[in-house]
Amino acid sequence: MELILASGSPRRALLLGAAGVSFTTVVPDVDETPIEGEPPAEYVLRLSETKARSIERSDDQVVLAADTTVVFNGSIIGKPGTLSEAVEILTELVGETHSILTGWTVTDGETEEFGVDESLVRFNERTNEELVAYVERTQPLDKAGGYALQGDDGWLVSEVIGSRSNVMGLPIREVIDALRTFGIERSTP
């Protein structure tokens, strides 16, 4: 079986590749607008299923799709539209703990494995000036919550409870286990 990663995320591709999984990438084109009143866990799972089902595949191909979002005080925090919006989001999160939810789906067209994984992230206290410099340096417009765990080295993120790979966009251990049920094995130990 061949694996298709239904994602444009370079971080998901990096995580899968580092885990020794061979794949090709197809970027899905789906509406990611939350449905009013939709709980965050249902939102990320719905999007992962929609992305997985939107990809054309042959009988010898399996599709993996995922969606990750930041949740703070019960509200979904998406990708910032501007650098100033990224600073606003980060200002709200400094010194606080927020949740990272990733919904993932693996399907061969007949069978699906899926799940939602949660990690908790706590930010260090930072000044507005420090956050502005961080945003200008990292340009985080393609990242939910306006930040990235990789390369942080503890400057912004003080603690992660749960899977660090989930924070980066893919709970790799759970996904690898699901891929095995479809005959997708790691090429490296």
Image (tube, rainbow, N blue to C red):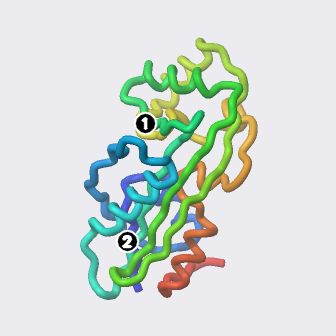
In this rendering, would 28 be left or right of 152?
A: left
Residue at image location 37% in from the left, 54% down from the top: 8
The amino acid type of the residue labelled 1 equals Lys
Gap in Å between the C-alphas at discs 2 and 1?
24 Å
The circle drawn on residue 79 is 1
Q: Nearer the viewer, mark 2 or mark 1?
A: 1
Q: Please, what secondary structure does the residue beneath circle 1 have?
A: loop
Residue at image location 49% in from the left, 50% down from the top: 68
Q: Position of residue 77 (x, y in %)?
A: 48, 36
Identify residue for label 2. 4
Residue at image location 71% in from the left, 53% down from the top: 162
Vertical placement of residue 24 versus 164, above or below: below
Few, some or many residues within 10 Å of mark 2 (<14, 14–19, 20+): many
Q: Position of residue 36 (x, y in %)?
A: 37, 41
> Picture quarter containing residue 78?
top left
Residue at image location 37% in from the left, 29% down from the top: 81
Pointer 2 with pointer 1, Cβ within 8 A = no
> Picture quarter containing residue 176?
bottom right
Few, some or many residues within 10 Å of mark 1 (<14, 14–19, 20+): some
| Disc on the earlier residue, 2 or 1 | 2
Q: Please, what secondary structure does the residue beneath circle 2 have?
A: strand
Vertical placement of residue 87 versus 151, above or below: above
In this rendering, would 6 be left or right of 138?
A: left
Q: Quadrant of the C terminus?
A: bottom right
The amino acid type of the residue labelled 2 equals Ile
The circle drawn on residue 143 is none
Q: Quadrant of the N terminus?
A: bottom left
Q: Position of residue 29 (x, y in %)?
A: 26, 55
In this rendering, would 26 be left or right of 43?
A: left
